[in-house]
Image: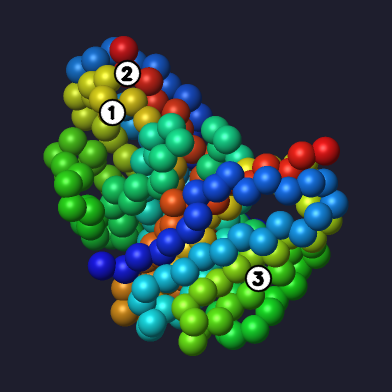
Amino acid sequence: QKEVEQNSGPLSVPEGAIASLNCTYSDRGSQSFFWYRQYSGKSPELIMFIYSNGDKEDGRFTAQLNKASQYVSLLIRDSQPSDSATYLCAVATSGGSYIPTFGRGTSLIVHP
Amino acid sequence: GAVVSQHPSRVICKSGTSVKIECRSLDFQATTMFWYRQFPKQSLMLMATSNEGSKATYEQGVEKDKFLINHASLTLSTLTVTSAHPEDSSFYICSARQGPDTQYFGPGTRLTVL
């Protein structure tokens, strides 16, 4: 059973701070890693994907992947109240036909 | 990113009726689409994988005769909830896969069965 674990939160950070969201996965053969943002009552929106160890930056977002430790994280710099949402981690493997396994999500609250 | 549409966005129906939800990939072809269900404050639950031109693959516990999926073209998949009951009320979300592994989600359909 492939598992993707996330702390449900809520993670509360002040506006302007760095929000750090973490995700661990059980399948060591995982190859593709995704972060989605889901606002309340809306569908998930793809923020970033990462395939290789290390950091990948896109604007205020940085995804970090460590395959040896089987974790992937998302950093949000200069957090804004509009970043308040649930962040879903998803992991996929070719052996699983690239059907991603989603974590339950971490709720982020950015307070002014 | 790629655009996926879903229609209708919201539907209210009487118990016992059937409801069809459409999912379209607007700017790319998707050989694979996925259907999810999400209850309030719960995680996404994959219902089935829809492959163009072939039968859908249903997840364990999902009734294929109740949730009919048709993927007639590379840009359209439909989910029909047959003989809907109040316990089927949920947020139904489709996604379309672009490339080998990247999914883009539709905006979702909120179904309320009275």
Q: Nearer the viewer, residue B4 or A44?
A: A44
Density class for disc 3 (Cα within 10 Å; few <14, some 14-19, many ≥20) is many
- Foreground label between 3 and 2: 3
- Work out whether residue B5 can be spotted: no
**Which residue matches tag 3?**
A63
Q: Quadrant of residue A101?
A: bottom left
Residue pictured at 20% horizontal, 17% vertical: B16
Q: What secondary structure is found at the residue carrying circle 1?
A: helix
**Which residue matches tag 1?**
B88
Image location of residue A63, percent across then percent down: 65, 71
- Residue type beneath disc 1: Asp
Give residue A57's mark: none
- Work out whether residue A78 can be spotted: yes
Q: Nearer the viewer, residue A41 or B20?
A: A41
In the rendered view, tell whether residue B89 sits above or below residue A8: above
Asked if badge 3 and badge 2 are on a common chain, one would say: no
- Residue type beneath disc 2: Val
Q: Nearer the viewer, residue A34 or B98?
A: A34
Residue pictured at 23% horizontal, 41% vertical: B68
**Which residue matches tag 2?**
B113
Image location of residue B73, percent across then percent down: 38, 54
- Residue type beneath disc 3: Ala
Label pair 2/1, CB-CB below 8 angstroms: yes
Gap in angstroms between the C-alphas marked 3 and 2: 40 Å
Q: Chain of mark 3?
A: A
As drawn, is B8 to the left or to the right of A20? left
Image location of residue B94, percent across then percent down: 43, 46
Q: What secondary structure is found at the residue carrying circle 2?
A: strand
Residue pictured at 47% horizontal, 78% vertical: A70
Gap in angstroms between the C-alphas marked 1 and 3: 36 Å
Density class for disc 2 (Cα within 10 Å; few <14, some 14-19, many ≥20) is some
